[in-house]
Amino acid sequence: MLHSSARRPILAVPMALLALALVTGCSEDAKSTPDPAPTPIASLNTVEMELPRIEFCQLIPDGAVEDAVGGKPASDSSYGNGDVVEMAGVGKDVVHEIGCAWTGDDGTAARAWVFARPVNTAFARSVIASGEKTKGCRTIAGPPYGKPATTQVCRTADGKQRLRHAGLFGQTWLTCELATAKAEETELRDRTDTWCSEVANALNTAR
């Protein structure tokens, strides 16, 4: 009995060291693992993505918002289906959308919204056709942000340049955009592409 009990501390030391090494190794691995890069917008599998028509503002990562508006937002807002919202150039109106917006210190604005009702391809095409008639806007080549989809550049009344991606994901029509007076079109395109990719991924339930 004495010989057996004397051996126990010797065996316990290596086991304790092993446990400590495992914990330390896991901790170091966790610290060294970088955050995954956002999926490039052109690589989104929009055919397989499933986007619910729900309140989604809280699903958008803070980092995605900060990258879009150039820092922590100075203000944010959200609205739901049936809310009365101030519409640019229209005034207050009842909306049938679910959406949110963030504004940076320099006035850069990031927005995203989904139609509250299911949308079919025919209706989606009518939305695209209607948007092509918007004054101050032009349609440009863009990534397949849904099917059908559209990409549009506009000059807003307050002097900003706005880039918008919109498209149909299953039965959900998603629109996202970025508007700023502080970026050239190439930079605006890169930031908007990243922003819209983050929005679509945040809503996607088919993961």
Image (cartoon, rainbow, N blue to C red):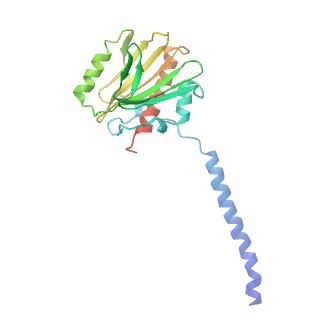
Residue 48 x/y as whole percent:
33, 40
- Farthest residue, direction bottom: 1
Residue in the foreground of this view, choosing between 162 and 116 = 116
Q: Is residue 127 left or right of residue 42?
A: left
What residue lies at 72% left-to-right and 74% top-to-bottom? Answer: 12
What residue lies at 52% left-to-right and 28% top-to-bottom? Answer: 76
Q: Quadrant of residue 142?
A: top left
Residue in the foreground of this view, choosing between 32 and 65 = 65
What residue lies at 41% left-to-right and 15% top-to-bottom? Answer: 88
Residue in the foreground of this view, choosing between 196 and 175 = 175
Residue 109 x/y as whole percent:
51, 22
Check the picture and name the quadrant holding the C terminus.
Answer: top left
Q: Quadrant of residue 125?
A: top left
* Position of 159 relative to 169 (above/below): above
Residue in the foreground of this view, choosing between 93 and 153 = 93
Residue 42 x/y as whole percent:
41, 29
Q: Is residue 52 left or right of residue 64?
A: left
* Position of 1 relative to 94 (above/below): below
Residue 14 x/y as whole percent:
71, 70
Q: Is residue 46 left or right of residue 181?
A: left
Tally the marks: 0
What residue lies at 31% left-to-right and 14% top-to-bottom? Answer: 132
Check the picture and name the quadrant holding the N terminus.
Answer: bottom right
